[in-house]
Amino acid sequence: MTRTDITIAGIHGKMPRIHSSAFIAPGCRIIGDVEIGPDASIWYNCVIRADVNRIVIGARTNIQDGTVVHCDSPKQGSPEGFPTIIGEDVLIGHMAMVHGCILEPGAFVGLGSIIMDGCVIESQGMLAAGAMLTAGKRIGARELWVGRPAKHMRDLDEAALAGNKLGVEMYVENGRAHKLANSIG
């Protein structure tokens, strides 16, 4: 079956590399030097564009509907630029903007939030819905940051961390169901 509702395209001699168990929803645009790991899910109408640097998306990570993931090119003062490196078991909510940053394993990005160049969200760190993490900021492990610009609000308790882990598991299962229903790889 040929699908015309998904774009998987190369640029500058680089093609996306997508694990066979990943779910790529209709409407997605995946371009350039992108690597997507096992059981990851890229939901409806996401754009993952690695035309000026690379993007890595780890195993079991989900990128929810309408999210844009990009990177930043090398330039004076930043010879490596800012690739976007997303670890395993990361939750990224609907309509987020993720740009030139590092999301360590188990990080959480709330819906409608913005992460700018050079930012890091450490393992199990959380950026709240609608928040904006300005360039170069770092959210520590198990910290919750909120607001525009985002600031540390509190540390996350075990219940919040357990909820995030459950969310990852739910999205892996839901991605498998959608993949089967849509007959796409």
Image (cartoon, grey):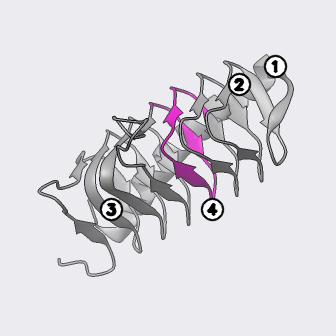
SS class, disc 3: strand
Residue range in magenta is 87-107
Q: From this view, report whether residue 141 is shown above or below residue 34.
A: above
Of pointers 4 and 3, the one earlier in the residue sequence: 3
Between the C-alphas of marks 3 and 1, the distance is 35 Å
**Magenta stretch encompasses residue 100:** yes
Q: Amino acid at mark 1?
A: Asp
Q: Amino acid at mark 2?
A: Leu
Between the C-alphas of marks 3 and 2, the distance is 30 Å
Is label 1 in contact with label 2 (beta carbons under 8 Å)? yes
Between the C-alphas of marks 1 and 2, the distance is 7 Å
- Quarter occupied by the N terminus: bottom left
Of pointers 4 and 2, the one earlier in the residue sequence: 4
Is label 4 in contact with label 1 (beta carbons under 8 Å)? no
Where is mark 2, residue-wise? Answer: 161
- Quarter occupied by the C terminus: bottom left
What is the number of the mark on residue 91? none
The residue at 47%/64% (across/down) is: 46
Where is mark 1, residue-wise? Answer: 157
Where is mark 3, residue-wise? Answer: 30
What is the number of the mark on residue 95? 4
Q: Amino acid at mark 3?
A: Ile
